[in-house]
Image (cartoon, rainbow, N blue to C red):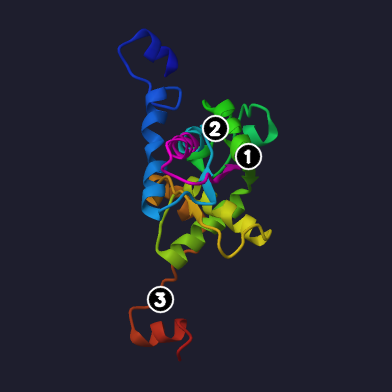
Amino acid sequence: AKSISENYPVTLVNSLNPYRLEGQKTAAFEIVDVLGRAPDYHFIPVGNAGNITAYWMGYREYHESGLSDGLPKMMGFQAEGAAPIVYDRVFDNPETIATAIRIGNPASWKKAVAARDESEGVIEALTDEEILEAQRLLAASEGVFCEPASAASFGGFLRKAEEGLFCSSDLVVCTLTGNGLKDPDAVLKSVDKPVVVENSLDAVLKEAGLK
């Protein structure tokens, strides 16, 4: 794609394009405007690393303009099988069920590391099992069907909550970056199959344990 954009009248729209990051950063403005302040922690999936880079740009600009009193800690999460930033090496053959973050050499690698370090945050790796469990919990408890890659942010939150990171006054944001219909195959492979019963009230009651 990069080669095509360099030789033909085609625009590259991933995070190598600075205009993309300039647009994405405004999401941080909206978060501060809606919440009334910057969150204490912002959890976000990390694949090509454009989002964590752009959100941090936005938070910093709002803060430097006097429109926000504080800055969040940026909490990025990659998949264990595609975690080049976490392990500081390129993954030639990244593997994860979270296809949107299945990236072995992120375009915004250095900028994401800067966002992590400047905000005193983290970039860690989650197993596919942790990601899928977070996806299931969001669907079951909140009615939110997100793609596996999106659930990495919530999975990261669950891990840090279990570690006792937060206090009761902390304001936490988790960004979900894609709808579950973007990647339904992963869900279909991981959920229980429907139970088929005879078309009768008696059969339904028996299967439900009501008779």
- Can residue 46 be seen here? The reply is yes
Q: In which quarter of the image is residue 89?
A: top right
Identity of the amino acid at label 2? Ile
Q: Mark 2 points at which residue?
A: 103
Residue 159 inside the magenta-drawn segment: no
Q: Quadrant of the N terminus?
A: top left
Which segment did they paint magenta?
56-80
Secondary structure at badge 2 equals loop
Q: Is there CB contact under 8 Å for labels 2 and 3?
A: no
Q: In this view, does 98 lie above or below 172?
A: above
Q: Position of residue 150 (x, y in %)?
A: 47, 47
Depicted 174 relative to depicted 169: above or below: above
Q: Which callout, 3 or 1, points at the residue further toward the start of the chain? A: 1
Crowding near the residue tagged with mark 1, few <14, some 14–19, many ≥20 C-alpha atoms within 10 Å? many
In screen coordinates, is 19 left or right of 105?
left
In this picture, is 112 found above or below 139?
Answer: above
Q: Name the residue under label 3.
A: 197
Element at label 1 = loop
Q: Distance between the residues labelled 2 and 3?
A: 43 Å
